[in-house]
Image: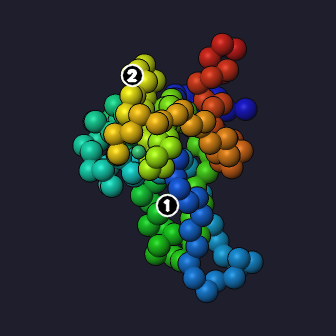
Amino acid sequence: MARPRNCRRVGSMPESNYFKPRGIPLSVLEEVILNVDEFEAIRLADLEGLYQDRAAEKMKVSRQTFGRIIESGRKKVAEALVKGKALKIEGGEFQMALVRKFRCDDCEHSWELPYRTGRPENCPSCKSGNIHRAEQGTGYGRRFGRGQGSCCRGTQQKE
Ligand SMILES: [Zn+2]
């Protein structure tokens, strides 16, 4: 089995992981698989507009690696758009950035903070102190299957 070469840090999972052109039955629809790390590269560089070296830093990869990831990702997105294929986002070599989720009981605002930043005292939205830690969604690991977590955790100790 191929071992992942490096660990690509992903800050957020796609909200929707399947895009399909309207009017094409699933039986004849071709799929393009966009890996989660490619999705993240596109998000950082094309949506957030980060320079590639900054985006590479965020994903904890070299600039060259980032360049390859995003090139491959853009090509897949283009292929789906141009050829009318479905786009499925899953798998890839990545590890989720560790974040803690909080939720406000008063206004239902929820937000994320990286670890080691201390517990927030107020809701950033309504300033209420009535907040609690929300558990990280557990659905992703199964939904996005292979790739998740298998990258850094575990494989390092075996070597
Ligand atoms: Zn609030």
Please give left or right for residue 75 compared with residue 24 in the image.
Answer: left
Q: Amino acid at mark 1?
A: Lys
Residue 72 drawn at (x, y percent): 46, 52
Rendered image: mark on residue 89: none
Quadrant of the displayed image that contains ligand 1:
top left
Placement of 125 over or under 85, stated as above or below:
above
Q: According to the image, label 2 marks what residue?
A: 117
Total marks placed: 2
Which one is closest to the eye, mark 1 or mark 2? 2
**Residue 5: where, in percent of width, then height?**
55, 28
Residue at 74%, 78% (x, y): give it: 27
Q: Nearer the viewer, residue 136 or 62?
A: 136
Tag 2: amino acid: Thr
Q: Which residue is mark 1?
A: 76
- Quadrant holding the N terminus: top right
Q: Residue furthest bottom?
A: 23
Q: Is mark 1 within 8 Å of ligand 1?
A: no
Could you tell which of marks 1 and 2 lies nearer the N-terminus? Answer: 1
Where is residue 141 drawn, in percent x and y?
Answer: 67, 41
Q: Quadrant of residue 61?
A: top left
Q: Residue 3, relative to residue 107: is it above or below? A: above
94, above or below 116, in the image:
below
Q: Secondary structure at mark 2?
A: loop
State left or right for residue 140 relative to residue 115.
right
The percent position of residue 13, horizontal first and vertical second, equals 52, 47
Identify the residue at image location x=72%, y=45%: 142
How far, Cα to Cα, is label 1 from label 2?
A: 37 Å
